[in-house]
Image (cartoon, rainbow, N blue to C red):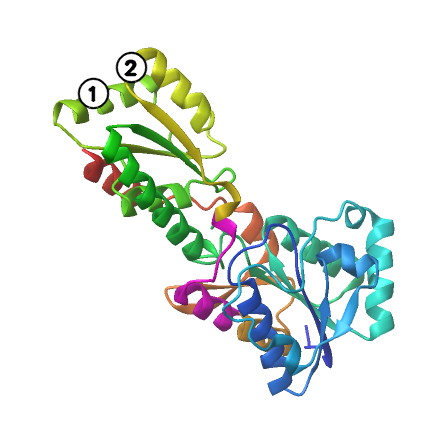
Amino acid sequence: MEPKTIKKIGVLTSGGDAPGMNAAIRAVVRAGFYYNLEMYGIYRGYEGMINDDIKKLESKNIAHVLERGGTFLKSARSAEFRTPEGRQKAFDNLKKHGIDALVVIGGDGSLTGAHLFYQEFGIPAIGLPGTIDNDLSGTDSTIGFDTACNTAIQAIDKIRDTATSHDRLFFVEVMGRDAGFIAINAGIGSAAAATLIPEKKMPIEKLVERLKARKKAMKQSNIVIVAEGGKSGGATEIAEKIKKQLPSYDIKVTILGHLQRGGSPSSFDRVLASKLGVAAVEGLMQGKYDVMAGIINNKIVFTPITKAIVDDKEVDEDDFRIAKILST
């Protein structure tokens, strides 16, 4: 397909926020200005597209946003956009502003919306992987994942102080939806006693054995990382099961929750978001549509959105093996 002439690009963030989204927006807009394009911010994701919350962006709009967490364009989940009528409204608003193409920053639901929009209306779109879960194929890391891991590890370091002071067993639940990437990295980075992830089921009996072995080895603290979305339940449910088998243990539960979404993005996430933002604009100009921009082995790659959101990205078996070795 011959590349379309693109003069105006709309950028939006959708779904859950992730540290580095502002850096990605900034890079998209800066790249657009470099190529003499008009850039438009679509506020509150697809909901803003439907409600015509669309504004032309200038340099002042992206000043001092690189270091900020969250997204200054705001984010939202839109039930109306899931309907043909809602998408028609959104398309009409884009036409009104003369927007030729879209850059959509978000997770699999957000990229699915970009794919549907391209299929139905032919609006060229490139997705950027903005999610702390790191569960999109076509990129080694998603925007926000590194920062979320750092936040989790810093929190766990603080929890270890009190765990050591009182000889307590802590169960710490981290985010990741149904993927264990944050958990496995936090487990390795914080010297966890065990890491429970959705992809690998650990029987309660096996966890009990490990905790007993660590107590016998006179370990001063025990922290078990639990990824949300596991088949055995969350940290609270697992802690209750362990308490029944180890009633003498002083057990506490901490759920880190949305703490992991916030904060200033790490240097890694700032650089990743910046590279992908430029790649998105250049990709659109080269005729790469209905794809997600990612980085694999430090090279920019474009993966069809349908592949990026469907192909299962699995936790590296070697990471899981290393976590197990280091927890003994």
Q: Is residue 278 left or right of residue 101?
A: left
Q: Quadrant of residue 232?
A: top left
Type of the residue with mark 2: Leu
Main SS, magenta region, reads helix
Residue 11, image x and y in percent? 67, 68
Are discs 2 and 1 less than 8 Å apart at CB? yes
Type of the residue with mark 1: Lys
At x 64%, y 82%, the residue is 59
Q: Nearer the viewer, residue 120 or 52?
A: 52
At x 85%, y 65%, the residue is 93
Q: Which element is circle 1 on?
A: helix
Read off the magenta span.
260-276
Residue 132, image x and y in percent? 49, 51
The disc, 2 or 1, on the residue closer to the chain's N-terminal end is 1
Q: Which mark is residue 307?
A: none
Q: Which element is circle 2 on?
A: loop
Mark 1, residues whose alpha carbon is within 10 Å: few (<14), some, or many (≥20)?
few
- Marks 2 and 1 sit apart, C-alpha to C-alpha, by 9 Å
At x 41%, y 18%, the residue is 240
- Residue that label 2 marks: 246
Q: Is residue 316 left or right of residue 235?
A: left
Above or below, comparing residue 57 to residue 184 in the picture? below
- Residue that label 1 marks: 212
